[in-house]
Amino acid sequence: MVPRPAQWLLVLLLLASAVAAHRPWHPSSFWPWRQDPQQFVGTSLKVPKILHHVYMGGYKEYLAGTKRRPAVNVAAWRESCLIQHPDWTAMFWDEANAHRLLAEHYAWFLPTWARYGSTIARADAIRPFIMHRYGGLYLDLDVQCFRNGASFLTGYDVVLQASSGPWDKGTINCAMASVPEHPLWMVYAHLLPSKQQENDTLEATGPRVLAQAVAMHFDTKLPIKAGLHADADDTVVQVYPAGQWYLACMPPKDEPACSRLLIKALVTGELPLDRLAGHHRFHGTWYDAPHDDRLWEDLRATVLQSPRMGHQGAGQGLIQPAARPQPRSWRSWGLPKAGRSKTSRAQEANARRSNQ
């Protein structure tokens, strides 16, 4: 008969084997007090000062497109990010550069890359490889920058943007920041070949794949919760909620009240935007009908041409750099929320109507 202590030892070994088979072993898996991600947040900027933009057609075609469709693909938005990050290295990725990166460092992906039939699929698919190889801050070309983004990245190994509303799967890929060679990006990359049969770009190469990769890396379920996460290697991932970092609102058709509030904040300066490094404008040129609605036409006319934007017309001088953002979203200053009194909600509604 096996002695009782040996029985317990056998049980513990079996449990340890099960855990190791599901996820690589790490001491933090067994020590609850090491699970708090806050203890791994540093005080220095880990993310390299590299600003990435992607346009498969190349820089000349990008500039030509901004002239043909100024309301959809505004060069001033990218320019605002360059202005706000003067000491960062800017990298502009076209198809030739993307193919070279894959051929030199990720040749296993080239067969999948060759089968992509659209430029947006390739523009999406190259992002995890850029993040893995170089690190830095990736921004879509329709992201307008309000300030330098370094304070939002300080102390973290990876920074992601959460979505909201009908788009909510946890994360979107319009803004991503990372240290080089973080394992999350290879999880993302290795998911892509299995997604090629998807007809929806969001599901095949875009934010839904990123959300799935995050869920797999942290062994959790969708949607990904905003906040701090620590993985088995004690690297810290910050997922900013909607209303912080580069997502003020979802597209105007989904969140019209939030979009009107953002316009007011940008034009009048009456509402605090210190929790935003910028805003993703959701002017996806790859859609059949880009999000070129009247609301953002008004924003372009009143904000991009405003003296408050500085002589570049792209955000210079609009907002001063801020310290690390606080948990409270800027949207809480003007949007009605559950739990407020009927009087306060009515006052806010009247205030919004008077400003429309």
Image (cartoon, grey):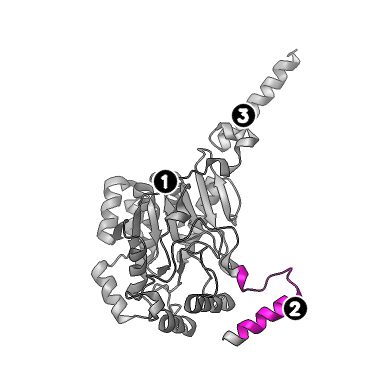
Can you give x and y, in whole percent of width and height, for residue 237 in the image?
Answer: 51, 48
Residue 67 highlighted magenta (yes or no)? no
The residue singled out by tag 3 in the image is 16
Residue under circle 2?
Answer: 343
Q: Residue at x 61, y 74 (%)?
A: 334
x, y percentage for residue 245? 49, 61
Say which residue appears at 30% left-offset and 65% top-offset: 56
Residue range of the region highlighted in magenta in the rendering: 332-353
Q: Give me the C-alpha separation between circle 2 and circle 1.
A: 46 Å
> Within the image, what quadrant is residue 87 found in?
bottom left
Name the N-terminal-most of marks 2 and 1.
1
**Label whose residue precedes the other's in the sequence (3 or 1):** 3
Give the structural element (helix, strand or loop) at label 1. Answer: loop
What type is the residue that disc 2 sits on?
Thr
Q: Amino acid at mark 1?
A: Lys
Determine whether label 3 and label 1 are within 8 Å by CB.
no
Sequence-wise first label, 3 or 2: 3
Q: Is residue 197 visible?
A: no
Q: Viewed as shown, does residue 63 lie left or right of 342? A: left
Disc 2: CA contacts within 10 A as few (<14), some (14-19) or many (>=20): few
- Mark 3: give few (<14), some (14-19) or many (20+) Cα within 10 Å: some
In the image shown, does 320 or 166 lie closer to the viewer?
320
- Which residue lies under the disc numbered 1? 46
Placement of 62 over or under 19, stated as above or below: below
Name the one closer to the observer, 356 or 288: 356
Q: Could you tell whether 21 is left or right of 11 in the image?
A: left
Residue 333 at x, y percent in the picture: 61, 70
